[in-house]
Image (tube, rainbow, N blue to C red):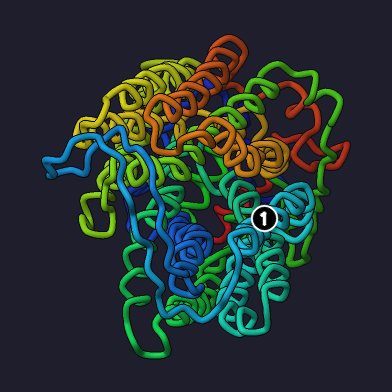
């Protein structure tokens, strides 16, 4: 607890505030008078810009996979196979079927392998910058790192048509560069949330910003499909031009409203600053100048240096390892449903996604909505002290996000040729999986808020591996007959099994409390300056400015 102190001939009185611990979360929420629901609060504005930034990043991944169907020339060919499921609405029996794929008016004569190389080039760049992103964000700040990542993605998207005409190799290089710059985006936002998000709002802000990614999954294919159908400029280049121009506008707003920390935000209110710094318990370092107007006109500076990441202690810490495993296993479901759902509906159930419009987006829409609902409920439970943070994280991640979602995934795989039932269970699986946004997705802010970006970078480096591995597994299981429900069922069993394994590890080993290796590393104080002393200086600045 901090107590009243005096300096010189003039006394400075301060309220007593407990430092951030899991046991005092609920009591602090009643002591601090702040309008948490202020729509234009500084941290809310950063979250809104983060939503759009995530939307632009996920859109950049998806729009090429949609546009490439109009970019390349498809030669007419006959394909005969034995379908297990009839075309919905038809009365035919399960006899051999011949499909005729006709030639379109594409521009580029690229082979299937070349198309795959173009789409995969992004991920090779993306995985490289995970570790560097954490160091860059800590040394240069989350504002610059996140802004450069989203803006650089927009520039690369804007140049996509030009590089496509230059050749496959040029386009692959551009997509690789896009992966490099986008690799810093999610790490730097986690770094920012470690500074900006109060402890019992972490689930909400993590999920709110993450909803931008789901919005990208929902909106981008629809908009890209429409633009590709236009005759103006051949249609498909419009997809990349629109995305690039939106990114240009976004960066102007980001530079205006974002800041590396509450203490350096030019327009934050003194009440919100007091609220965040008290609740966040100084989760990051600051270099701030304080002016003691009551006793002297001179300026006193207190510098706080960056703490070093304790690699050995982190990798021998069970909650850290639980988070590492959970994020890796969860991404199998996250990427798996994203990559497998459309081919399964098209190849096995003969589901015509292009002719059903918004109906095919129902699973993503429901997932996006449930993310916000679960996060809000989670923060309410934590704020009111109904359950410890550790229990809440385990329920969201393991019980709901792993076990129940995997059950629905298995039910979807065993729904036979019933398209409606299959989509229903897929939707339930994704709704349950959305609880992981209030599980592993914000657990790095719990166990090491001063290293939130670094922890996310370490975990995400391996978590993106399923993006490389999963297509190979799908090919291995379905290569004998890609239209067989039995063979595809093995893919879904694999995804469910990996997800459940991650849920078991998280359930047994995870924690919602800040770990000792994070506490011992400090928050950037000088050796002779404790967190209590720094918080005292911080509070004095607020009193003087208010």
Q: Position of residue 20 (x, y in %)?
A: 57, 29
Q: Is residue 409 left or right of residue 323?
A: left
User: Which percent across, then down, holds residue 11?
Assistant: 63, 46
Residue at position x 51%, y 47% in the image: 274
Decide if residue 294 is in sight here.
no
Question: Circle 1 sits on which residue?
Answer: 183
Q: Is residue 17 above or below residue 304?
A: above
Q: Nearer the viewer, residue 375 or 78?
A: 78
The residue lying toward the viewer, choosing from 468 and 54, is 468
Q: Report helix, strand or loop for mark 1.
A: loop
Residue at 68% over, 47% down? 537
- Image quarter of residue 381: top left
Q: Is residue 140 above or below residue 207?
A: below
Q: How many marks are shown on the rendered structure?
A: 1
Q: Residue 48 at what x, y percent from top left?
A: 42, 60
Which residue appears at 78% of the width and 66% of the height? 298
Instruction: Name the foreground residue: 408 vs 312.
Output: 408
Side (left or right) of 520 relative to 141: right
Q: Please state which of residues 90 and 429 is positioned toward the viewer in this rendering.
A: 90
User: Measured from the top left, where is residue 431 in percent x and y?
Assistant: 32, 33
Among all residues in the image, which is located at the extreme bottom? 232
Task: Tell me which residue sits at (38%, 62%) in the image.
Answer: 101
């Amino acid at each position: 607890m901090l107590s009243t102190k005096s300096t010189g001939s003039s006394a400075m009185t301060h309220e007593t505030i407990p430092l951030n611990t899991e046991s005092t979360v609920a009591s602090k929420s009643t002591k601090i008078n702040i309008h948490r629901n202020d729509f234009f609060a500084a941290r809310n504005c950063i979250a809104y810009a983060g939503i759009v930034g995530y939307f632009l990043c996920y859109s950049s991944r998806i729009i090429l996979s949609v546009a490439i169907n109009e970019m390349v020339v498809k030669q007419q060919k006959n394909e005969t196979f034995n379908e297990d499921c009839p075309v919905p609405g038809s009365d035919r029996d399960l006899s051999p079927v011949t499909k005729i794929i006709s030639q379109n008016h594409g521009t580029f004569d690229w082979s299937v392998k070349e198309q795959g190389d173009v789409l995969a080039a992004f991920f090779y760049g993306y995985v490289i910058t995970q570790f560097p992103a954490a160091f860059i964000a800590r040394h240069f700040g989350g504002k610059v790192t996140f802004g450069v990542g989203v803006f650089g993605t927009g520039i690369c998207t804007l140049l996509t048509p030009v590089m496509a005409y230059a050749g496959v190799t040029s386009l692959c290089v551009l997509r690789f560069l896009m992966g490099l710059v986008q690799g810093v985006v999610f790490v730097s936002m986690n770094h920012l949330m470690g500074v900006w998000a109060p402890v019992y709002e972490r689930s909400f802000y993590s999920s709110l910003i993450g909803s931008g990614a789901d919005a990208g999954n929902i909106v981008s294919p629809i908009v890209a499909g429409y633009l590709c159908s236009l005759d103006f400029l051949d249609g498909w280049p419009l997809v990349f031009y629109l995305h690039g121009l939106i990114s240009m506008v976004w960066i102007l707003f980001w530079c205006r409203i974002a800041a590396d920390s509450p203490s350096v935000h030019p327009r934050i209110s003194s009440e919100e600053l007091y609220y965040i710094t008290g609740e966040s318990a100084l989760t990051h370092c600051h270099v701030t100048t304080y002016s003691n107007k009551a006793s002297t006109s001179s300026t006193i500076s207190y510098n706080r240096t960056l703490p070093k990441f304790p690699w050995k202690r982190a990798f021998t810490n069970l909650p850290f390892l639980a988070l590492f495993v959970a994020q890796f296993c969860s991404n199998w479901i996250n990427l798996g449903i994203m990559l497998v759902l459309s081919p399964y509906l098209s190849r096995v159930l003969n589901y015509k996604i292009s002719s059903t419009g918004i109906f095919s987006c129902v699973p993503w829409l429901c997932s996006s909505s449930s993310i916000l609902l679960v996060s809000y409920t989670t923060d309410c439970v934590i704020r009111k002290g109904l359950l410890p943070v550790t229990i809440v994280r385990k329920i969201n991640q393991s019980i709901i996000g792993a076990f129940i979602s995997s059950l629905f995934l298995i039910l979807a795989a065993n729904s036979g040729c019933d398209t409606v039932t299959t989509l229903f269970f897929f939707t339930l699986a994704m709704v349950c999986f959305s609880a992981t946004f209030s599980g592993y997705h914000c657990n790095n802010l719990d166990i090491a808020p001063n290293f939130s970006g670094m922890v996310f970078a370490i975990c995400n480096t391996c978590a993106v591996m399923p993006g490389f591995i999963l297509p190979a597994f799908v090919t291995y299981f379905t290569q004998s007959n890609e239209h067989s429900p039995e063979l595809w069922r093995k893919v879904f069993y694999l995804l469910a099994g990996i997800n459940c394994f991650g849920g078991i590890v998280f359930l047994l080993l995870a924690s919602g409390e800040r770990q000792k290796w994070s506490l011992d590393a400090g928050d950037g104080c000088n050796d002779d300056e404790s967190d209590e002393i720094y918080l005292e200086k911080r509070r004095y600045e607020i009193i003087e400015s208010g």
